[in-house]
């Protein structure tokens, strides 16, 4: 058993129990595999840091549920090799469904879904949703779109094309094959909110010409298209408004606050805070989000639903919390207890407060987050620590 695996076993897992009744140990084995296991899919530790080796043979895939053919669905996940998409793919595969994952690998990676490549229930297609594609499926989870401000602002025109044409193509497909369609929308459609916490009835406060507009307005038009297809063509739609989410498999170079702070603390570097650090965010753990997406897809709720954890932190508080957990898990953080902060200029149009009102999710789909931010952070720190060691 590796040191990381041993450390992982010391953390309580009861809070991480997923709604879909798949034990967290089963999920963890997919993103934090033990290298000593014969079926471990992690890159083998190499003494030579300039090379990397991957296992070529595995004796078996992770066990998936045997479903009655009547209950087995064909499910398309766009952006399925990304951070959120790959966890959703894991869950749908373990539940026993047939999963088609499409991704253009702009921010997603094949290694995120390497557990399933070659499995008879799984198909991976390199494809950009900006172009049409035809597949026969029962459900579409439309996640494809860069979500980190650094990524979505690097090519804003492409982000807008993804918001419009990507959603248009996936809705057209859903209409033709009569699939149920779920749009991964975002808390960003509320902009820099003038109401707090944010309820689904709130129409938002978005700057349509600012640097974030490519994403915010892209997702707003994606919602408008979704409800237009529902009204005009009867497409069966679901809309999830996803609030800040974190967990294993976030990109190193993601640029978002959770991965930045964890990596900075693990490397003993200063933590970068944009502006005065008094902006707030509410962070949910990836397993909760995946539970919420599946619960929404399976529900009758056609209205938009906020999926997020209402536990709200200022960015200053969050920097302290992340540093404390990195120390607890055995990371670096220089200066024995003191967090070293580097203040950088504020980000233009940065939303100042964000917290979901999740009453609708509780009432309509029977969902609320189960994982505390602290438990989720411990797991994520272990994951990043492993990544740094490789
Ligand atoms: O994490 C997410 O899921 C969300 O991330 C982004 O939204 P944002 O809240 O701006 O995400 P971050 O870039 O992580 O920023 C959060 C806060 O931390 C601050 N920050 C970020 C990074 C950093 O190194 N330092 C820092 O102070 C930002 O200025 C902001 O106030 C995306 O735009 C959303 O679509 C996405 O849902």
Image (tube, helix red, strand yellow):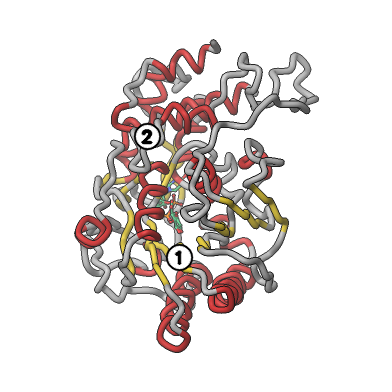
- Tell me where residue 25 appears, x and y as whole percent: 44, 26
233 shown above or below 206? below
Mark 1 residue element: strand
The percent position of residue 330, horizontal first and vertical second, equals 44, 16
Tell me which residue sits at (69%, 18%) in the image.
45
Q: CA distance from mark 1 to mark 2?
A: 25 Å
Which mark is nearer the camera, 1 or 2? 1
**Residue 174 locus on image (x, y percent):** 54, 73
Q: Is 243 placed left or right of 120 in the picture?
A: left
Q: Which residue is mark 1?
A: 182
Image-based side of 8 in relation to 104, left or right: left
Q: Is residue 230 above or below residue 119?
A: below
Q: Is residue 310 visible?
A: yes
Task: Name the residue: 55% across, 12% down.
Answer: 2
Q: Which residue is mark 2?
A: 376
Q: Is mark 2 within 8 Å of ligand 1?
A: no
Quarter of the rendering occupied by the C terminus: top right
Q: Which residue corresponds to the image point at 62% horizontal and 54% vertical from the top-left?
A: 101
Q: Which mark is residue 307?
A: none
Task: Categorize mark 1 by other alpha carbons within 10 Å: few (<14), some (14-19), many (20+).
Answer: many
* Corner quadrant of residue 24: top left
Total numbered badges shown on the rendered structure: 2
Tell me whether the residue at label 1 lies in contact with that at label 2, contact meaning CB atoms closer than 8 angstroms: no
Mark before the other along the chain sequence, 1 or 2: 1
Quadrant where the N terminus sits is: top right
Residue drawn at (55%, 46%) of the image:
86
Dot 2 surroundings within 10 Å: few (below 14), some, or many (20 or more)? Answer: many
Query: Which SS class for mark 2?
Result: helix
Query: Of 155 and 161, which appears nearest the observer?
Result: 161
Q: Position of residue 53 (x, y in %)?
A: 77, 25
Given residues 144 and 195, the one toward you in this image is: 144
């Amino acid at each position: 058993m590796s040191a990381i695996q041993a450390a992982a076993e010391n953390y309580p897992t009861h809070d991480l129990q997923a709604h879909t009744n798949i034990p967290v140990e089963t999920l963890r084995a997919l993103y934090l595999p033990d290298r000593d296991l014969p079926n471990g899919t992690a890159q083998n530790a190499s003494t030579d840091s300039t090379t990397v080796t991957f296992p070529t043979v595995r004796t078996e895939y992770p066990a998936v549920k045997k479903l009655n053919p009547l209950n087995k669905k064909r499910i398309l996940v766009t952006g399925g090799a990304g951070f959120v998409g790959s966890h959703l793919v894991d869950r749908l595969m373990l539940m026993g469904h047939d999963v088609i994952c499409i991704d253009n690998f702009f921010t997603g990676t094949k290694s995120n879904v390497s557990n399933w490549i070659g499995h008879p229930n799984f198909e991976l297609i390199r494809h950009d949703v900006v172009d049409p594609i035809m597949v026969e499926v029962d459900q579409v989870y439309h996640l494809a779109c860069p979500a980190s401000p650094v990524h979505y602002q690097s090519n804003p025109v492409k982000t807008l094309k993804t918001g419009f044409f990507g959603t248009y193509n996936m809705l057209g497909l859903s209409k033709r094959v009569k699939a149920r369609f779920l749009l991964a929308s975002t808390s960003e459609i509320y902009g820099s909110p003038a109401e707090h916490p944010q309820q689904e009835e709130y129409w938002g406060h978005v700057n349509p010409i600012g640097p974030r507009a490519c994403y915010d307005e892209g997702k707003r038009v994606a919602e408008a298209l979704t409800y237009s297809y529902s009204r005009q063509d009867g497409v069966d739609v679901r809309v999830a408004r996803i609030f800040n989410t974190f967990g294993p498999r976030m990109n190193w170079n993601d640029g978002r606050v959770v991965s930045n702070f964890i990596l900075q603390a693990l490397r003993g570097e200063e933590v970068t805070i944009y502006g005065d650090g008094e902006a707030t965010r509410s962070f949910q753990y990836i397993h909760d989000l995946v539970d919420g997406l599946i619960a929404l897809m399976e529900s009758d709720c056609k209205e938009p639903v906020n999926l997020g954890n209402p536990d709200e932190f200022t960015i200053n508080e969050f920097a302290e919390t992340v540093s404390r957990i990195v120390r607890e898990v055995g990371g670096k953080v220089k200066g024995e207890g003191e967090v070293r902060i580097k203040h950088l200029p504020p980000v233009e149009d940065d939303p100042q407060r964000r917290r979901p009102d999740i009453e609708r999710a509780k009432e309509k789909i029977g969902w609320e987050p189960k994982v505390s931010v602290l438990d989720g952070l411990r797991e994520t720190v272990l994951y990043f620590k492993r990544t740094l060691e490789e």
